[in-house]
Amino acid sequence: MGVTAAALLGVGALPAYAGATSCPSDGNLPGSATCSKLSNGILSIYPTGTGNSVMVNYYRTGGGALTAKLGYERGSVNNWWAFQNMNTVPFHYSQQKGITASCSPMIGKLYTSGGATYSTPPSDPC
């Protein structure tokens, strides 16, 4: 979803790109975004503004069937979107939402139906 569509949905300004397609070894992307390289893709989180919106993206590059859900952790509380079929590769699976503004660090998460959880390094929105 681009910036224009995001603005129409009222979720605030979001990055103009779908998500990272590569991840540096330190896990730091431009701005306050962070990422993790997984065996079958890249998980990234993009907090915006003063922590008043967040986008979590999983760029899937390979692997077999996968049902998983994206989420983020803030203040030791996990927030999840619904499970989804993530079988298409390569493909960006993204979720975003407007949230209460806070400078608390956020961690992007991917939780598989098999019970595995993957996360990004903490991202400081401010």
Image (cartoon, grey):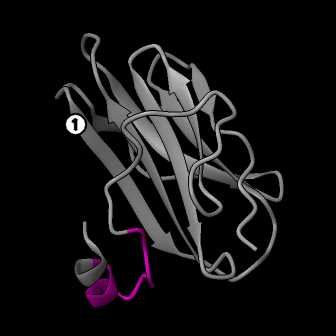
Residue reaching furthest to the left: 88
Q: Would residue 18 be found to the left or right of residue 78 on screen? A: left
Q: List x then y, in percent, for residue 73.
A: 70, 51
Task: Tell me, yes or no, whether the highlighted magenta stretch contains residue 88.
Answer: no
16 versus 39 height, above or below: below
The residue at which mark 1 appears reads as 91
**Quarter assignment of residue 74:** bottom right
Three-letter code for the amino acid on which mark 1 is drawn: Phe
* Chief SS of the magenta region: loop
33 versus 37 height, above or below: below
Task: Tell me, yes or no, whether the highlighted magenta stretch contains residue 7.
Answer: yes
Q: Residue at x 71, y 54 (%)?
A: 123
Q: List x then y, in percent, for residue 33.
A: 59, 55
Instruction: From the viewer's side, name the closer residue of 98 and 29.
Output: 29
Give the class, few, some or many, for how many residues have Cα within 10 Å of label 1's Cα (few <14, many ≥20): some
Residue range corresponding to the magenta coloring: 6-15
Q: Residue at x 49, y 37 (%)?
A: 43
Q: List x then y, in percent, for residue 63.
A: 29, 11
Quadrant showing the C terminus: bottom right
Q: Residue at x 47, y 44 (%)?
A: 70
Q: List x then y, in percent, for residue 59.
A: 35, 36
Q: Would residue 17 be found to the left or right of residue 123 on screen? A: left
Quadrant showing the N terminus: bottom left
Q: Would residue 26 be found to the left or right of residue 36 on screen? A: right
Q: Residue at x 23, y 79 (%)?
A: 5
Instruction: From the viewer's side, name the closer residue of 76 and 88.
Output: 88
Query: Dot 1: what SS?
Result: strand
